[in-house]
Image (cartoon, helix red, strand yellow):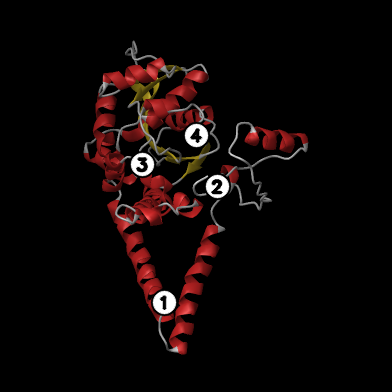
Amino acid sequence: MRTALVIGTGLIGTSAALALAQRGVTVHLTDHDPEQARTAAALGAGTDEAPDGPVDLAIVAAPPAHVAVTLADAMRRGLARGYLDVASVKGGPRRELEALGLDLTAYIGTHPMSGREKSGPLAATGDLFEGRPWVLTPTRDTDTEVLNLALELVSHCRAVPVVMDADAHDRAVALVSHMPHLVSSMVAARLENAEESAVRLSGGGIRDVTRIAASDPRMWIDILSANPGPVADLLSEFAADLDETVRALRALQSSDEAKRREGATGIADVLRRGNAGQVRVPGKHGSAPRVYEVVAVLIDDQPGQLARIFADAGMAGVNIEDVRIEHATGQ
């Protein structure tokens, strides 16, 4: 791949453009907001000037609701040899393209499984996709050259290619991304009108659960509008579990010993199932989860404290896999 056109210079589009530009690919940038494309170009993601002719690969990084229309326009104008999108939903856009009667041999749907709570080109980084799964959804009609271009893009971004059926992908992201986001938002919504004295007690647990609730609501409305059925099915199952958990908790309030035992069994069951599900979450770079030694260190809130810990760990030949900082209330 020598040339690419990125259509849509938000977080994902600009991050892909940065990765390609860093590897010597000539990248052209365009966006419905020209200022956003100019910002991406100023960051080193490419040029906002139009290409002289067809590029090797056109990357459509538009919201799911606009993917099919944007792709159709690019394909009819013959802007590239191959076309792909990076939307978080795959089945819907492809069916829309089929309904428009387009030849889809030059198209492949893809989805990089990476992102941030922030959006726009200023949030982009060239290593956003490093070590992350990048789903490819080829069909029997997909031209081999186009599949190879998509794999080259994934390689340049240092991501891990994963081949899936489009509808299976949509059910999977409903489970591991879309439903959790809504659940996180619903938990965070409990804090909106909570007493300030209660909110001040927040610790790592509530921060972990609500972190993704900080994402742009407009972006998520677009995403969920493109995949409502699978998400609704999962939330229905979640709601049934929630009802059972509420009943178990009510039983724990009972003065009847048998009911209390029944309630405790119900709570133990949901916690056990949670344990069983959590251990299935992949570890670093999608590998099997590993158990790491956890070392708690109490430090003062002073400059250089973390640097000393990192330096000592390095001298001891210890790799720090992750860092978590817990701030004591009021300190």
Asked which quadrant contains residue 325, the reply is top right
Residue situated in front as seen by the camera: 328 or 70: 328
Element at label 1: helix
Q: Does the CB distance between marks 1 and 4 fall below 8 Å?
A: no
Can residue 30 be spotted in the picture? Answer: no
Q: Residue furthest right?
A: 316
Q: Residue furthest left?
A: 100
Disc 1: which residue: 248
Amino acid of disc 1: Ala
Of tags 3 and 2, the one toward the viewer is 2
Q: Which residue is mark 3?
A: 215
The x, y position of residue 79, in whole percent, is 32, 20
- Could you tell me the amino acid type at mark 3? Ser
- Find numbered disc 3 in the image and state the secondary structure of the residue it sits on: loop
Front disc: 4 or 3: 3
Q: How many angstroms separate mark 3 from mark 2 (CA)? A: 23 Å
Label 1 and label 3: CA atoms lie apart by 33 Å
